[in-house]
Structure formats: C-alpha cells, structure tokens
Image (cartoon, coloured by chain):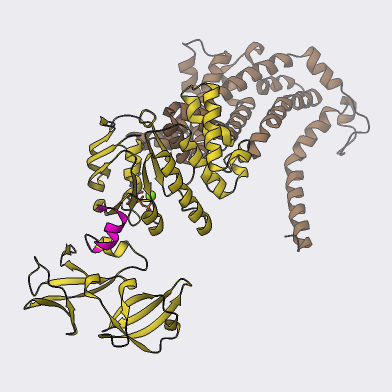
Amino acid sequence: MASIDIQSIRKSFGTFPVLHGVDLTIRDGEFIVLVGPSGCGKSTLLRMIAGLEEVTSGEIRIDGKRVNDLPPKDRDIAMVFQSYALYPHMSVADNMSYSLRLRRSTKEKIASAVGGAAAKLGLEPLLERRPRALSGGQRQRVAMGRAIVRQPKAFLFDEPLSNLDARLREQMRAEIKKLHGDLRATSIYVTHDQIEAMTLADRIVAMHGGIVQQLGSPLELYDRPANLFVAGFIGSPGMNFFEGRYLVSGDHADLRLSNGTMLPIRKREGLESGSAATLGIRPEHVVLADNGALEAGVDLIEPTGFGIIMHVTIHGIPMKIFSQDRRMLKPGPAIRVDLPQDRLHLFDSEGKRVD
Amino acid sequence: MRSRPVLTILHRLAILAYIVFALFPLFWLLKVSVTPNDLLYSEGVRMWPSRTTFDHYAFVIAHSAFPTFFKNSLIVAGSTAITVTVLASLAGYALSRFQFRAKYWIVALMLVTQMFPLVMLVAPIFKMLSPLGLTNSLTGLVIVYTAFNVPFATFLMQSFFDGIPKDLEEAAMIDGATQFVAFRQIILPLTLPGIAATLGFVFTAAWSELLFALMLISGNDASTFPVGLLTFVSKFSVDFGQMMAAGVLALIPACLFFLLIQRYLVQGLTAGAVKG
Ligand SMILES: Nc1ncnc2c1ncn2[C@@H]1O[C@H](COP(=O)(O)OP(=O)(O)OP(=O)(O)O)[C@@H](O)[C@H]1O
Ligand SMILES: [Mg+2]
C-alpha cells in the first residue's frame, strides 16, 4: 500500500492540451473517485499514474518515489480496465496468476494467492474456464481477481462496472466497497455513475476540462459545491438554477430574476449588490406547501417508485422537484412551493460559490 | 434464412458453381496426369479416360530431376515463408502500435515497391546478385522473394494486430511484462490466425514463383519446381502426362500446409478478450 502524490501534472497529445495542471495527494489506503463529463481527462490521468501514458510535465510520486519515467511493470500498480482486458488464450486461473508468474513466484505462493482471490470473489468453480465462456459479470470478477492476487501498491479502476447491467452493478459496487474495507488498498476509481462515486469514495475529485474543480468528501461536494459545474454535476436529478441579480437591501438580500421577481435569500459577504449571480437549489430540497411563496405550473410527472420527479415552471424557468408525497402523482395544473433559504446555493458571475 | 428454402438452395447452388469453376483446372490436371500417353490425343475431350495409369508418376519420381526440384522448392518456399513472417510480424506490430516520425514515409515507400511490374526489376536484381555470387543459388532466391513479400505481409500482419485490443498488452505491462514480453506472450498467440494466413500466403507465392526462378537460376541443381516443370517441354513435344503428374505432386505440400494451418485460419482466437 502506498500514498500517491501528483504535482501540477500536465498532459498534451501533440499540441492538444488535455490536463492543465492537476494536483492531488492521495493518502495511504484512501479510496479516491474521479468523476467528470466524458473527455475531461479522467482516463488520461489514470493511465499516467499507471505508466501507460507519458507525462508532459509535472511529477508523480508513489510512496515518495518519483515514477515519471518508470515503465508500468516497475510501478507495482494493478489496474482494472473497462473492457476487462482478460487474456483470451488463458484460463481464469492463468489470467489471475500471470502477474505472479512474471515475477517468478513459487508454485505454492501462486496457488495460495489465486485460491485466496478466487475465494474472495466466488470464482472457484470457474478457474479452468476460458474468458469467452464467462458472462459479463464473471469476467468483471476475474478482472478484479487479477488485480488483487498480487498485493500491489495501489489499484486503478477505469469505469470497471459500466458494462454491467444495473442489478449486477449494484452488487459489484457493494463488493468493491467490502473488498476495500478488507484490503485497505489505495485506490483510484473513475466513474460516470453518481451513486458509485457517492457510495465508494473517501474523497471525490470532480474534474472538468482537464482541471480539478473540487476535491472533497462526497457530502462536501453535495452540500457545498465549489462552483456551478460541481453543483450541476453532483446529484441526480441535477440542481435547479436561477439566473438574476444579487440585490442587498438592509440586512437581507434578494435575487432579482429577469422578469422582476424577487427571491429572498440570505445576505452574503463578498458579493457586490447589483452583480450578476446564479441561485441553485436541489430538486429534493424544494418544499411543497399549500401556502408556499411561489406558484409552479406542472408540466410533467415522472414517478420513480421511490419518489416522484416533477417537471414544473416557475416564473418561466423550467425546474425539477423531487418529492415522496404520493398525492403529487395527481397534483393539478399548479402547485405552490417554497425555496428554503438554508438550502440555497449562490454562485457569482464566474460560477464560484459565495457563502 | 431457414424459412426461405428457395433462397437457401439458390445460395448453395451459387457456392457450388463457384467451387466447380475454381476447381475445374485442378481436376483437369489430375485427369491428364493419369491418362496413358496413347489415349491422350486419341480419345477426344472426355471427362475421364477409359483407362488410367500411374506410369507418369512413377517416371517423374524415379527417372526425372523432379525430386531435386521439389526439395529446392521446399527449401526456398519454407525459408521465405518463415523469414517473411518473422519480419512482417515485428514490422506489422510496430506499424500497428508505435508512433514514430518516419512512419508515414515508410508505409508510402512500402506501397511504392508494390507498384512496379516485377519484370522491370529482373535486370537490376541480376546485376546486383551476380557479383555477390547469389545467382544460381537458393539463398539468392530466398532473399529476392523475401524482399518482395515483406511489404504486403507487413500490411497483412498489421491489420491482424490492429484487430487486437490495445488494452490486452497494457494489462500485461501493468501485470509486470515488458512490451516485448507482452508482445510474445499475449499478442502473438492471439495473432496465430494472422501468422498462419501470412505463412500460407507467402509459402504459396514463393512455391509457384516462376519469373525470378527462371532468370536467376540455370541448371537443374538449383532449379525450383516451376522451372523444373519446363524441362518437360522439349524442342519437339510437350510431355503433358509427366508434366501434369509433377504438377499434382507439387500441389501436395501446399495442401498439407493449408490443412495444418486451417484450424488457425478459421478460429477467432480473440473472442472473450474484452466485453463482447
Ligand atoms: N491517444 C490520444 N491522442 C489524442 N487525444 C487523445 C488521446 N487519448 C485521449 N485523447 C483526448 O484526451 C481527452 C481526454 O480523454 P480521456 O480518455 O482521458 O477522457 P475521459 O475523461 O476518460 O472520458 P470518458 O469518460 O469518455 O472515458 C479527450 O478529448 C480525448 O479526445
Ligand atoms: Mg475514460
């Protein structure tokens, strides 16, 4: 197990810049999840840590040792690929033991390591099979098994579950969490999936356009998103936004929408009265109240079973509300809502959070 | 398909017609090789002679220089096939996986070599080989055949490597292999169908090459079998029976070879590598 230190890493493919200076310190045993929209450079960062991609500038240290110029085999890192990348001409057991055989481990050591990993992942009945005779979920397990047989310094996962169906994904997610609990291995995990990010991470790294937007625990990102990008990216359904002007009057403040409506908000330090700002509120934080301050026209109802996603329009602005109130399945043409002040997020004209 | 028997039958008939068309010359070869000399011209055009004989075969094997030709051809075609396949595998892998500066120009040059009619090159090649003592030698033939077959074989191998996901060797490198070990232990076994195809292709090309064999070789000792076949053409007549018998015998190694490799040709070895 090891810590990983990434210092102002940059990456360009030719002249095309992909990563613009990423800093990240990962503690020993920590589970880090990288999230961000497609093409933001998550895989590229992961592959640079693995040694599959050259570092344009900056430094990567594993356990304090600079690894920029080390080939992958000398970094002692395991990786689970999205495609699994199992060796098709080898049995499951041979797939799992390949790394140990390359290191010339003894037969007994290999057998016990493979046996142990197979037992952890329920692969014992499959050890003699070829990958082509496995289901997607089983292949995924083999890929995990291949990573855990040798105890590497760190695990890298590049969207390891995205090829599985929803049910299996849930199950594997829990298993990965359990596995991490057992092994306490430093892990970096790339995903598109909100729930995977929230449930697995010790800390989440939200990336956008090759820049780290926010680094923090899942709840920090959920409760106090650092900017508009993180606010919109974390959470499902996504946060609602209202654009307007921040106006201070005395000891309270309002956001004036373009149609003149005033939404009362808490007064913030560090934001000039009259400046442009964006207000955000999560769908699950909108309160339905018969005597609510705002009227919302109902456009569409999406029951999910667990709750109801309502698409409404407030002052000409479309937004979403999440409610568990079954009466809202048939809400009538309009409802009244409140936007509780302590649930509101305010962002300045550059998209940065203002508290 | 199953619910349209008419279509199926048409489909099969089309394939059958194609096969008959393709194999008919071979059948004719076989037929003439077993036709006794006295019946060859006297019976007219028949699908099968009224009497058959293996005399031609016996004569070719026992009394002609054919066994020497055969051995020479085996050496030349075998060496060429192996040399070309080794070179083409390495070069094809490099073209498929590495980015390097002159790649574009190397590929372009290799394509250019494929555009010349070979006849144009006979004279210069003879000029180059004769001071080196490589005319009239099997080694010279192997070198020339290798040079001519490497570009195409490289493109062939490259396309096979392109079909193998890059993830596989990356996984191997993370597992602790160098790139070369990953190539040898992971990629190469998966390219067996490609290697088999390349071997087969180059072997048959070298086996039946006539132009250079004719130009560079004089005398029976170093003749390959296509040149040897011409010895059955004398000034006054062509001994068709013996020539065809020799031809049939010459087909045997090629057939054996394809029997050996056909398992790899039809097998999709990469199935199950990545999510599918
Ligand atoms: N080998 C390459 N050559 C040129 N550009 C590349 C190469 N690999 C990646 N890129 C570019 O780098 C950017 C980041 O790619 P990367 O694969 O890291 O994205 P990602 O965040 O993993 O996306 P996804 O979530 O879709 O997997 C993309 O714009 C991509 O086009
Ligand atoms: Mg990716």
Left or right: residue B38 compared with residue A236: right
Q: Is residue B17 above or below residue A101?
A: below
Q: Quadrant of residue A11?
A: top left
Determine the residue positioned at 39% across, 55% down. Answer: A199
- In magenta, the rendered stretch is A215-228
The chain shown in brown is which? B
Determine the residue positioned at 22% across, 71% down. Answer: A342
Residue ranking furthest to the bottom: A333
Q: Nearer the viewer, residue B263 or B147?
A: B263
| Whether residue B115 can be seen here | no
Q: Give x and y (percent) for residue B219.
A: 64, 12
* Residue A225 within the magenta-colored segment of the rendering: yes
Q: Nearer the viewer, residue B234 or A61?
A: A61
Q: Give x and y (percent) for residue A168.
A: 53, 54
**How many numbered dots are placed on residues in this image?**
0
Q: Give x and y (percent) for residue A5.
A: 25, 38
Q: Quadrant of residue B261?
A: top right
Left or right: residue A125 compared with residue A221: right
Q: Nearer the viewer, residue A244 or B95?
A: A244
Q: Is residue A108 above or below residue A53?
A: above
Q: Nearer the viewer, residue B167 or B213?
A: B167
Q: Quadrant of residue B46?
A: top right
Tell me, what hue is chain A? yellow
| Whether residue A306 can be seen here | yes
Determine the residue positioned at 33% across, 57% down. Answer: A37
Q: Is residue B85 above or below residue A244?
A: above
Q: Give x and y (percent) for residue B71.
A: 68, 16
* Residue A57 within the magenta-colored segment of the rendering: no
Which image quarter is the N terminus of chain B in?
bottom right
